Image: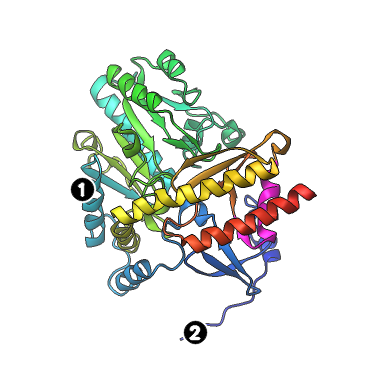
């Protein structure tokens, strides 16, 4: 039975919503695979993936079926009880990773909040309250709670909200000497993104992550990998740490885990998890049966050799064409990233104009992202059809050509 809804327009956003977002001029109303339709019926190709969230595109039949089936069973019981989808999802994640314990929440920020709190609690219990320092990288991004924006190395997100939490140190990314100079017996954790996402799709160097692991072991600190954006197949492995062969103590993930349904997770080992006994940390909605049922279906689809290899193959298809566009129009100095997380770095004459590229692409019926003012970001479905890649990049080239002509 259809339900009639009141008509809304983009202008209503400016009248009804807190102005912390500045959404595009159109409203998407329907999606299928890597195609989206707006209110006027215009079809767009989606290279954004909901910011690396829609790991299997829009309305994937396996996810629709999982959600529909669970919706007819039970929606929410809280963590006073447990539920079947939560336990099945935990088992699949643990079987596929270094971890043997999982904590579910609703977002990447919550997953990181739990990770940082666990690291401090472990250090407090084992070594005393003085061991509380968290080291993170400049230009990192770990979420929007006050703790997580304070840990992240971007003052623009944490300034203006009063005194920041103490015991947080920032060092340059990919600079092992700086990390070695900063770490000490006071350090409880080092948190790193295997690929810095929001600041420009910058992969970690192999020696950097290996060195971070060694230093953490030396100083009895925990190594935390923030895989909110890089996890769940985004890079061509189930998690990006698997590319490097460097195993963290704690891992946070979210975004693609639910394929569009909000869910986050913190993964860790049993010896660390025991420092979170009953009542120490919690969440009302974390481990929700609907979210976990959908996430289980995501893992079932993504964690297969054909999908993960397909992500690597599609990366090369994107990169080859983007490098050709960059060379022809002189607009990109580099194309970097892994799998379906790609950043095209704007050349010197185009610095600061990533937003202009987004607007030009939308005019050609293509949805793309930016990662800072100097990088155009692509984070499409992991299973995007090659035909959609090719057509989307045709539209992208038309947008670039028009932008260059002025």
Residue located 46% across and 38% down the image:
142
Residue to which mark 2 is pinned? 2
Q: Which mark is residue 271?
A: none
Q: Position of residue 116 (x, y in %)?
A: 37, 34
Q: Is residue 190 above or below residue 54?
A: above
Q: Position of residue 215 (x, y in %)?
A: 33, 19
Q: Which mark is residue 95?
A: 1
Q: Is residue 81 visible?
A: no
Residue located 35% across and 51% down the image:
309
In contact (CB < 8 Å): disc 1 and disc 2: no
Q: Is residue 106 magenta?
A: no
Q: Is residue 215 above or below residue 291?
A: above
Task: Give the magenta-colored segment's residue range.
Answer: 353-367
Q: Few, some or many C-alpha atoms within 10 Å of disc 2 (few <14, some 14-19, many ≥20)?
A: few
Asked whether, in this view, residue 138 is left or right of residue 190, the answer is right
Between the C-alphas of marks 1 and 2, the distance is 42 Å
Q: Is residue 362 magenta?
A: yes
- Residue that sits furthest to the right in the current view: 406
Task: Please tell me whether mark 1 or mark 2 is closer to you in this view.
Answer: 1
Q: Position of residue 294 (x, y in %)?
A: 34, 62
Q: Check the picture and name the quadrant holding the N terminus.
A: bottom left
Q: Position of residue 4 (x, y in %)?
A: 56, 82
Which one is nearer the viewer's eye here, 290 or 123? 290
Residue located 20% across and 36% down the image:
274
């Amino acid at each position: 039975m259809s339900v009639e809804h009141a008509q809304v327009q983009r202008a209503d956003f400016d009248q009804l919503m807190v102005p912390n977002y500045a959404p595009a001029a159109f409203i998407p109303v329907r999606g299928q695979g890597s195609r989206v339709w707006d209110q006027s019926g215009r079809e767009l190709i989606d290279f954004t993936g909901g910011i690396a969230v829609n790991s299997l595109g829009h309305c994937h039949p396996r996810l629709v079926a999982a959600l529909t089936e669970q919706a007819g069973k039970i929606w929410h019981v809280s963590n006073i009880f447990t539920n079947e989808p939560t336990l099945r999802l935990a088992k699949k994640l643990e079987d596929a990773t270094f971890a043997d314990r999982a904590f579910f929440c609703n977002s990447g920020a919550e997953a990181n909040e739990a990770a940082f709190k666990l690291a401090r609690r472990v250090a407090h219990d084992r070594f005393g309250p003085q061991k509380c320092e968290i080291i993170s990288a400049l230009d990192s991004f770990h979420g929007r709670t006050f703790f997580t924006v304070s840990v992240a190395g971007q003052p623009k997100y944490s300034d203006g909200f009063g005194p920041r939490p103490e015991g947080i140190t920032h060092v340059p990314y990919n600079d092992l000497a700086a990390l070695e100079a900063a770490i000490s017996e006071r350090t409880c954790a080092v948190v790193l993104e295997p690929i810095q996402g929001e600041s420009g799709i910058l992969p970690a160097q192999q020696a950097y992550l290996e060195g971070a692991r060694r230093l953490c072991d030396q100083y009895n600190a925990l190594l935390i990998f923030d895989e909110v954006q890089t996890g769940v197949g985004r890079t061509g492995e189930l998690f990006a740490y698997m590319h490097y062969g460097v195993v963290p103590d704690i891992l946070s993930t979210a975004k693609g885990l639910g394929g569009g349904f909000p869910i986050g997770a913190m993964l860790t080992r049993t010896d660390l998890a025991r420092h979170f006994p009953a009542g120490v940390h919690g969440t009302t909605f974390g481990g929700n049966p609907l979210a976990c049922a959908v996430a289980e279906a995501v893992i079932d689809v993504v964690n297969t050799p054909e999908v993960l290899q397909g992500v690597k193959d599609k990366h090369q298809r994107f990169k080859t064409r983007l490098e050709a566009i960059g060379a022809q129009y002189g607009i990109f100095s580099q194309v970097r990233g892994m799998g379906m997380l790609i950043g095209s770095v704007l050349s010197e004459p185009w610095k600061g104009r990533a937003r202009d590229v987004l607007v030009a692409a939308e005019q050609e019926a293509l949805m793309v992202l930016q990662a800072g003012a100097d990088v155009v970001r692509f984070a499409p479905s992991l299973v995007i059809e090659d035909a959609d890649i090719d057509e989307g990049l045709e539209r992208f080239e038309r947008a670039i050509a028009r932008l260059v002509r002025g």
